[in-house]
Image (cartoon, rainbow, N blue to C red):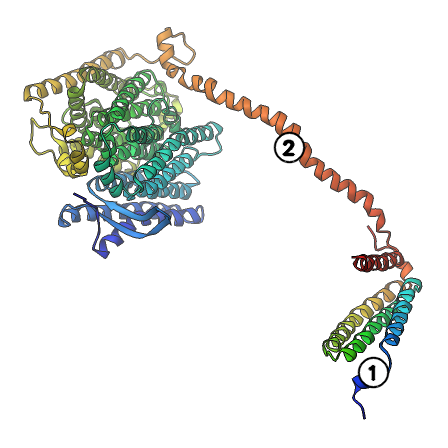
Amino acid sequence: MQEFILPANNAEMTWVCLLIPLLPLIGFLINGLGNRKLPKGLAGLVGCATVIGSFLLSLYLFFGFEGYGNRPYTTDIFNWIHVGALRIPFSFQIDQLSLIMLLLVTGVGSVIHIYSAGYMSHDENFGKFFSFLNLFVFSMLLLVMGSNYVMMFVGWEGVGLCSYLLIGFWNKVTPYNNAAKKAFIINRIGDLGFLLGIFLIFQTYGSVVYGEVFNQASQLSEVNDGVVVAITLLLFVGAMGKSAQLPLYTWLPDAMAGPTPVSALIHAATMVTAGIYMVIRSNVLYTLAPDTLEIVAIIGLATALFAATIGLFQNDIKKVLAYSTVSQLGYMFLALGVMAYSSSLFHVLTHAFFKALLFLGAGSVIHAMSGEQDLRKMGGLKKALPVTFITFLIGTLAISGIPPFAGFFSKDELLAHVFVHSKVMWAFGLLTSFMTAFYMFRLLYLAFYGNFRGTEEQRHHLHESPAVMTIPLIILAILSTIGGFMGLPPVFSENHMLGNFLSPVYELARRAVPSAFEAHHLSHSTEYMLMAVSVGVAVVAIILAYFIYGKKRTVPAEEGAALSPLHKLVYNKYYVDEFYNGLFVKPVMGLSTGLYRFVEKGIIDPIVNGFGKATLGGGRSLRYVQSGATGSYLLLMVLGIALILLLNFIN
Amino acid sequence: MNDIPEVIRTIPLNYYLYFSTALFCIGIIGVLTRRNAIIIFMCIELMLNSVNLLLTAFSSYRSDPNGQIFVFFIMAVAAAEVAVGLAIIVMIYRNVRSTDINILNKLKW
């Protein structure tokens, strides 16, 4: 049975779909062209209003979806590329998955835009910041709304560009620029894989439009067909780059050089989840390739564990959160690897809420500390920053998996799926969960409890952030508290709202490989046991963190202090950066230096300079011909004409 | 009264060729030997007119009006050239009080 996604039969839908990405683009143009000319208030207003507008339109689509019969539809805007067999329409596909992502991107995006208006208010490039932020939202919307892989790729590159621009936003600082370049280059490695994957999809299925590709795949391809495995692996390489998985994760911690709202929006809540979106979007292909899924799960788990251990000893407040993000992304890929697509998206959502909250909270702390990010210089901020503290506490509880906060439900559901798949993986997942709770509470105790360890000047400056920054914190805190109820586990409720809503997205995959989707119900007692274990582990970690950092008030060692070898290894992030530097960067730099010295200086330069010198020398000797004596000019002219006539005559 | 081409044809074409060549050579020799800019100018006009004469003669002998149309063009261009050239000569005279072209050897690199 062929089942194509039908175009919307409704001009209104087309307009709404077109306006959703168009609004941020307009905001980008206004703020981009009017940077420094527009007053800050207006720039902020344009930046926020366009994204909020997109959010309202997304809500309209979301609530209109049921009235549309819960049927996915596409809206063709125009025929973008049509060459031979290649047909790429510029069209949007609205289905359950893109609706959720739309709400996530525009919703969290709006909140962070509002926060940025406060956080960036002292920056002279306020308009530029908002224009980049709007461009990011535009690209991200293209990514999640596009109806084919090429549009996804355009959005994919667009968000990569914005990430680069925003990491290096304070471009007068060289390390920030280096971090931006690093992010861009490492993402290129992943993008190459993604691009090759798209080529292979086109070669195999003759199309890049989702509907056609998935129909073909579900009918033609065998399970673990070599081509499908190759496609999914290549696509996953793209996801590794964008979603910071081993071995391409090193850019994300460095990306914290950007302003904190950027870290919250791009490097925690939305862009880095693009890889997960892509895998869920391609769920038909991935379901057909269980071998790839196994690799995805292993890489996800390894990343989760690896990043969590690094997070244990970081002293920069944003670095801790960055490694925690890498670790949580690893969780999501672990879930994808065990085919818990919906659980993975659930964790994307809750993670977006609490990680955005944590980053914005960290931003508020940094703002209050006049730019200080070192946890060793903080302490006792609870009194000075009450709103930030309470919201940060909620975020920390959510990420640690304490019920009833959002992280508990998504993490628990995710781990339950992993438990069914493999007990060993589950155990490692639990270990990660333990470390997550530990380092997050370590962060909380170091920043908010104990005595203030900063300078006298910073102590005087301490202040709660303005309402424009605390209100987004409160909104996100509420979402982090109740966000988990959209996916209650089976023991509490038979109605998993998110799971049921997303279920049609996997219809084709289910038809292609029915066995993979057989429900494996855990008994209620097992479920209770899993929940109890994961909560217990988190509580133990919290108590441990309390004893070390809360009660004993241990402060991490100063820079350069003697550390045990293992501690030193972890503190220096396993020397992965140094390793990559030695393995890739140095040889490439050496090669370029060699080429510069011998090829550029030895061969190309002399040739080019030789041309210049020859011309100069020729001119210098010929200039005496021009004597200034008119008579000789005339004679030469006549002789020349005579010569021409003579030559003509001879021929 | 005979029409003009016929009158022209009363003289053999060879004679026109000799005459024009002679005029042209006089023009060239004048350009090369004289130093007064105005005389050089006149010599150039002489060369142009020798060509005009030849064109008219050929045109009559071949009963092809194209040659005479060409002559009109040459005259128009020559008139424009005279206007510009004389203006330049006048300016030169005002500057150096002479029309001797050998004085103008400053026109070099």
Horizontal and vertical percent position of residue A576:
40, 17
User: Foreground residue, A252 or A68?
Assistant: A68
Q: Secondary structure at mark 2?
A: helix
Residue A626 in the figure: left or right of residue A428: right
Q: What amino acid type should be assigned to the residue bearing mark 1?
A: Ile
The quadrant holding residue B66 is: bottom right
* Rendered view: A66 above or below A310: below
Check chain identity for marks 1 and 2: say if they share one: no
Q: Residue at x 81, y 77 (%)?
A: B57
The quarter of the picture where the N terminus of chain A appears is top left
Horizontal and vertical percent position of residue A20:
28, 48
Q: Secondary structure at mark 1?
A: helix
Horizontal and vertical percent position of residue A199:
36, 37
Residue A33 in the figure: left or right of residue B11: left
User: Foreground residue, A92 or A367?
Assistant: A92
* Rendered view: A591 above or below B20: above
Q: Which residue is mark 1?
A: B8
**Please, which chain is the residue tagged with disc 1 on?**
B
